[in-house]
Image: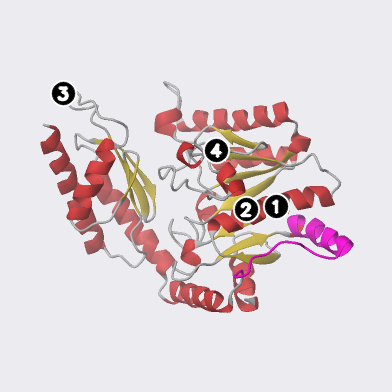
């Protein structure tokens, strides 16, 4: 565990001080929330407890992390989100932009929305802003140009912490070791899971900078304990698997491989843009989503939300490719060792699945 902590702190894209281990992304984000509240109390700022997230964000499904999550299905009938969890507009340019609004103008408006929320709530009540570099379960939402630059400028102006949820994007998925590097994000806290062990064993990690850690340490010394932890957190077997996973990523230069094959995948997926059922293709590195719609058909075919995605995912699975239908978006997240031939096979199977759907609708 000590070796893994040193490895993670050293490889972080911005200066980090400490690592804290949990067993899943949900547990990690739940722990971060408690740390943020603990830190606020340590600083004598008990009112600084609110956390800002985004609609369609996914940060887990425990009571606290589920409140960070901005997906209705994870809230309905669970009495979530809890009070104090705030959600902003999804940074999805195609869906959320106003007519004639450029990507940069859209990003400027979202940054102003954040500024307005902080002013309305009171900056002294906001503990942190939480975000995935690329939104995963919400539909593989790639941020618009200048989005993270503008968001960070607002947070810096109000001295509000930034938490980067790298559970999906960490360890090479975007073509850089961390999604924060891809988008120029400088977080105070990073949350890592999934690819840290290639998901062979459950493990997650939280990286904290000194600004976050020092007040927590001071409060712990004052009261005599940090009363939080999990039985399996930092398990030596899981830690050993994580260390070996990271060594393999480095030895095989998989991050550079993802940068090359990811560009190939994004290019090959773009060839599907003229298909009658394709509404949008978005992604970065080796993660992408193909959004489907029957609206372009003549006459347009009325379908319930998610029906087309579910049908296409079934045809794709029958063709040998497992995808995930997130509503009407098909998510693609192939293994980082995939080569160009494998990507070509995925795209061919996807085109065949879409053609089958088109035949059925006709």
Count the labels in the image: 4
Alpha-carbon distance for marks 3 and 1? Answer: 53 Å
Write down the region rendered in magenta: 211-233
Image quadrant occupied by the N terminus: bottom right
Comparing labels 3 and 1, the label whose residue is closer to the camera = 1
Alpha-carbon distance for marks 4 and 3? Answer: 35 Å
Kind of element beneath mark 3: loop
Position in image of residue 163 (x %, y %):
63, 50
Kind of element beneath mark 2: helix
Alpha-carbon distance for marks 1 and 2? Answer: 7 Å
Question: Mark 4 near mark 2, Cβ–Cβ under 8 Å?
Answer: no
Q: Is residue 218 left or right of residue 86?
A: right
User: Does the magenta portion include 340?
Assistant: no
Question: Mark 2 near mark 3, Cβ–Cβ under 8 Å?
Answer: no
The structure residue drawn at horizontal position 45% and vertical position 24%, both measured from the top left corner, is: 101
Q: Which mark is residue 30?
A: 2
Q: Which mark is residue 54?
A: 4
Report the residue marked by disc 1. 34
* Chain-order first, disc 2 or disc 3: 2
Q: Answer few, some or many: residues within 10 Å of disc 3's Cα (few below 14, many 20 plus, some between 14 and 19).
A: few
Q: Answer few, some or many: residues within 10 Å of disc 2's Cα (few below 14, many 20 plus, some between 14 and 19).
A: many
* Chain-order first, disc 4 or disc 2: 2
Report the residue marked by disc 3. 298
Q: Is residue 31 visible?
A: yes
């Amino acid at each position: 565990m000590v070796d893994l902590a040193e490895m993670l702190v050293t490889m972080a894209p911005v200066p980090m001080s400490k690592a804290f281990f949990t067993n899943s992304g949900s547990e990690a984000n739940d722990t971060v929330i408690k740390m943020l509240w603990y830190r606020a109390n340590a600083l004598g700022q008990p009112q600084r407890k609110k956390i800002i997230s985004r609609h369609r964000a996914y940060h887990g499904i425990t009571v606290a992390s589920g409140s960070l999550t901005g997906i209705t299905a994870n809230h309905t009938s669970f009495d979530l989100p809890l009070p104090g969890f705030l959600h902003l507009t999804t940074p999805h340019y195609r869906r959320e932009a106003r007519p004639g609004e450029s990507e940069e103008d859209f990003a400027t408006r979202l940054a102003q929305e954040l500024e307005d929320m902080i002013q309305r709530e009171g900056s002294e009540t906001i503990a942190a802003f939480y975000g995935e570099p690329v939104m995963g379960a919400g539909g593989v939402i790639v941020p618009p140009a200048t989005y993270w630059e503008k968001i960070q400028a607002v947070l810096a102006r109000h001295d509000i912490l930034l938490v980067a949820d790298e559970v999906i994007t960490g360890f090479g998925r975007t073509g850089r070791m961390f999604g924060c590097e891809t988008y120029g994000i400088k977080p105070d806290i990073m949350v890592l899971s999934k690819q840290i062990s290639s998901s062979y064993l459950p493990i997650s990690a939280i990286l904290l900078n000194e600004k976050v850690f020092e007040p927590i340490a001071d409060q712990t010394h004052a009261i005599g304990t940090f009363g939080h932890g999990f039985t399996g957190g930092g398990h030596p077997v899981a830690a050993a698997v994580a260390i070996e996973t990271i060594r393999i990523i480095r030895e095989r230069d998989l991050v550079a491989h993802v940068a090359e094959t990811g560009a190939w995948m994004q290019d090959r997926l773009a060839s599907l843009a003229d298909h009658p059922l394709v509404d949008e293709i978005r992604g970065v590195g080796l993660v992408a989503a193909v959004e489907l719609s029957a609206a372009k058909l003549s006459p347009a075919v009325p379908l319930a939300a998610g029906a087309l995605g579910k049908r296409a995912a079934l045809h794709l699975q029958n063709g040998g490719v497992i995808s995930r239908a997130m509503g009407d978006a098909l998510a693609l997240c192939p293994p980082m060792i995939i080569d160009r031939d494998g990507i070509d096979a995925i795209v061919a199977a996807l085109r065949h699945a879409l053609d089958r759907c088109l035949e059925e609708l006709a």
